[in-house]
Structure formats: structure tokens, C-alpha cells
Image (cartoon, rainbow, N blue to C red):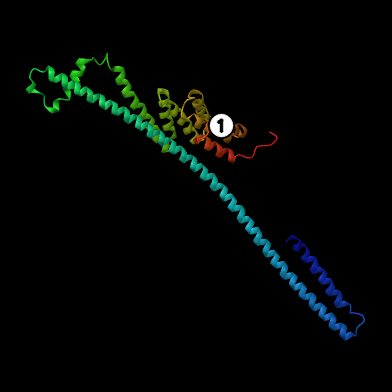
Amino acid sequence: MKSLRTASPATALVAAVLLGSLAATPLSGETPAGAQRDQNRIVSEIRQIQAQLATLVEAQTALSQAVEALLADREEQLTADRQSRAETMNTLERMERSVATLSEAFRDTNARLSALMVEVESVREAQRRAALLGGGSGEGDDTAPPDGEQAETPEVAVGDESTPEEGSGDEAATVLDEPGVSEIYLQANADYLQGRYDLAFTGFERVAELGGELADNARYFMGECRLAQDRLDDALEHFVSVIDDFPESSKHGEAWYKRGLILGRMGHESDAREIFEDILDVFAGTTAARLAQRELDALPPRDPGV
């Protein structure tokens, strides 16, 4: 198209020159009338060629404009596709975090229910023992207390059997502490899922300070809260804490992945690539490995000179 655009004006110029020359100079070797007829014929053909050239130039210009419009539309579509892909990846990552959080909450709820069932069974056993003790020590078996008052008798019987300050204080404290930690953790999870990241961070921080089985998860989600707030330095500190302080945690691989993700966002692509490659070896077959592979695929090709 470019050659046609440049050649057409030159061809038109040549045709115009020929047309002028033929108009000014009669053909030799023929009678004036014959020469005039030939000259008129040639002039007519040259004008037809000029008209055809003009039509071709217009068609070529329209075609060039159409091609440029198609290229512009294609570029816009590619840009929109890239943006859509990035948004989809971010959405998937948020969904994966939410699913992981819900899974942790489900497991914690089950653990809490199990603890409560144990506590209920313990209370029932104490009531049965109290009922037996009450039946054997009363002066009149026919004067048993009404059903509404029987709940007070086990407390007296159990109290007589073992003093609260001496026997079961530690066990009672343990039973009460576990639901307290779980409640704080579940409330922090709820705050996190609803976007109240500062409140969630405070709750997870409290759980981490109390220690116990939920401490590593709490520390991990402290990092998630700061990552959601785009406070990369703080988030990185908490994920590294999970790696260093809880090597046996179920969150260990995910903490490594988050570390690589944050380093990549900070511009340390080589460090991030190295971490993702290590995850593929150490945590093969896990969610962390799958996410690491996705990040490796999105990174630019490795420089052969490095």
C-alpha cells in the first residue's frame, strides 16, 4: 500500500506531461486529419488512466484508514484483555484467601465444639456422681428434693468431694481459656472477611500473644491484614515471623509464597523467582506450589546472561 501511495502521484504527473506534449505536438508521418484522430484517441486514453488512478488512490486511502482503525481496535482489545486477566488473577487470589480463612474457621469451630462436648460430658458425670452421693447420705429417701432444686445438690456434693481451690482450678481454667482464644480468633476472622483489617489485626495479635495452637495462624493472618492494606514492609515482617518461629506450621508454605509475592511487588524479581522455585521443590503438590508456579509463569523470561 505504501508503494502504491508513492507511485500514484508520479504516474499521474507522467500522464499529465504526456497529455500536454500530445496536445502541443502533432504526430509526424500522417495526414493532419489522421494525426488529429490518433492524438485525440491517445488523449482520451490518458484521461481514462488518470481517472482510474484517482479512483485507485481513493480506494487505497480508504483501505489504509480501515487497516489503521482495525489495528487501533486490536490494540485496545489486547489492553482490555491484559487488564481483565490481571483483575481475574487478583479476584482468584482474594477468593483463595477467603476459602483458606473459612477453612481455618471451620476447623477452629469443630475444635471448640469438641472441647464443649467434653465439658458437657464432664458436667453430666459430675451430676450423676452428685446424685449418687445425695441418695446415699440423705436421712429420708422419701423426702428427695424437687426436680427444680436438684441442680443445687450436685454443686454441694462436688464441693464436698474436692475443694475448688485445690483440685480442679487448673483444669477449669484450661477449659475456659480455650473457648476464649477461639472466640477472639473467630471474631478476628469475621473482621478480616468483612474488610475491617485493623480490628482483625488486633484480634489476631491478641491470639498470637496468648500462644497455643492458633498462634501460628494468627501470626500469618496478621501478615494478610497488612498485605490487604498494602503495607508491604509490615506484612513481610509477619510472614517471615511465621517462617522463622513456626517451622512446623501448616501455614509455612503459604508464608514462603507470600514472602516471594511481596518481594516481587517491591521490585526484587530475582529474589522472588528464587523463592518460587524453592517452593516448587520443597512444597510440591500444595496450594503454595501451585500459586508459586503461576507467579513464575507471569514473570518475564530469565536473562540468559544472569
User: At 35% across and 32% down in the image, what residue appears?
Assistant: 110
Q: Is residue 229 visible?
A: no
Question: Is residue 205 or residue 214 the one in the foreground?
Answer: 214
Residue reaching furthest top? Answer: 166
Q: Quadrant of the N terminus?
A: bottom right
Residue 95, position in %: x, y? Answer: 46, 41
Q: Residues within 10 Å of mark 1 (few under 14, many from 20)?
A: few
The answer to which image quadrant residue 104 occupies is: top left
For this view, does 255 lie left or right of residue 168? right
For this view, does 301 lie left or right of residue 1? left
| Amino acid type of the residue tagged 1 in the rendering | Asp
Residue reaching furthest right? Answer: 29
Question: Is residue 154 or residue 22 the one in the foreground?
Answer: 154
Residue 206, position in %: x, y? Answer: 41, 26
Above or below residue 86? Residue 6 is: below
Q: How many numbered marks are there?
A: 1
User: At 51% across and 45% down in the image, what residue appears?
Assistant: 88
**Residue picked out by circle 1:** 281
Residue 124, position in %: x, y? Answer: 22, 25
Residue 123, position in %: x, y? Answer: 24, 24
Q: Quadrant of the C terminus?
A: top right
Q: Secondary structure at mark 1?
A: helix
User: At 31% across and 23% down in the image, what residue appears?
Assistant: 175
